[in-house]
Amino acid sequence: MYDFHVHSIYSPDCRYDIEKMANEAIKRKIKLIYVADHFELNQINHEDMTFNLDDYKKEIQRVNRKLKGVEILSGLELGLDNSQFERFNQIIKNTPLDMIILSTHRVKGIYLSDEKFYSEKQTLMIYEEYYAEILENIKNFDNFDVVGHLDLIDKFKDRYYVDLEFSKYKKIVSDILKEIIKRDKALEINTSGYHSIVGRPYPKMEILTMYKRLGGERIIIGSDAHKPDLIGYKHKSVINTLKKMGFMTISIYRKRIPHLVRL
């Protein structure tokens, strides 16, 4: 079993080091994990969420040498807007990693966790802006491998007046999935949704079904674990669901090159 999305102390919202997370993976018989910590670039530099990538890679290498029973690969959970594309390209140029997950946690500079209630019309505008930003980034930025937790915005629906029907915004989601397929990127199945109000993985079944129908094949499965006891959470159940849907492989990334492995 694999976990493509694990955090460590290099993320400000995780207090466990890489060795601790890796040891837990060994206990759970997970043979490969990607440490994919938050790396976000903002127009205002002092609001960046970054760390030293060379130190990061050295720590991953150190733990790999020390521990047996699990392989640790390097990744990032990348967040940025279109003003930061070239800046990230320069940062990453001399630091090869194994995989980069492109994630969106905000809409036009507003973090999705901001507490405010909206009308149905306002809520729909927020959803459209959220997905439009994802679509724009995918179309104009290529230095990533995977689109992370695509419908994360649903996590915050308790902060809105309405729970929107998927039909109201499925067209733009379809456009995103077509771009993912066209650009040979992967879609993350992120099990952290089980710990939120949605009670299921990101993205929802309607999106996964649409992705498969459009010809999407590249997937990864990540727990988004910020604590050791969440590594690999619900992965077996998700794998069974994916197989029933007709997905037969996942994409293992090494040095940013995907290799298909059977589920």
Image: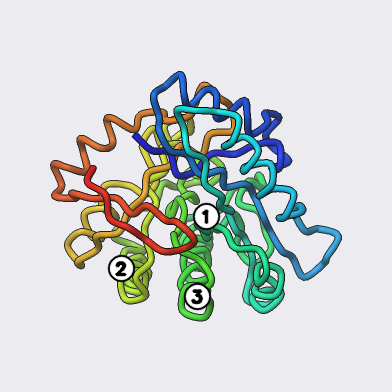
Looking at the rendered structure, the kind of residue marked 3 is Asp
Label 1 Cα neighbours within 10 Å, binned few <14 / some 14-19 / many ≥20:
few
> Mark number for residue 180?
none
Mark 3 lies on a secondary structure that is loop
Comparing labels 3 and 2, the label whose residue is closer to the camera: 3
Quarter of the rendering containing residue 239: top left
Q: How is the image coloured?
A: rainbow
Residue projecting furthest to the front:
65
Residue 257 drawn at (x, y percent):
41, 64
Comparing labels 3 and 1, the label whose residue is closer to the camera: 3
> Mark number for residue 174?
2
> Mark number for residue 119?
1
Residue projecting furthest to the top:
27
151 lies left or right of 38: left
Structural distance between the alpha carbons of marks 1 and 2: 25 Å
Structural distance between the alpha carbons of marks 3 and 2: 19 Å
> What residue is disc 3 on?
142
Mark 1 lies on a secondary structure that is loop
- Give whichever of 113, 226 is nearer the camera: 226
The quarter of the rendered structure image containing the N terminus is top left
* Observer able to see residue 165: no
Looking at the rendered structure, the kind of residue marked 2 is Ser
Quarter of the rendering containing residue 251: bottom left
Which residue is depicted at the point 71% across and 42% down? 10
37 lies left or right of 192: right
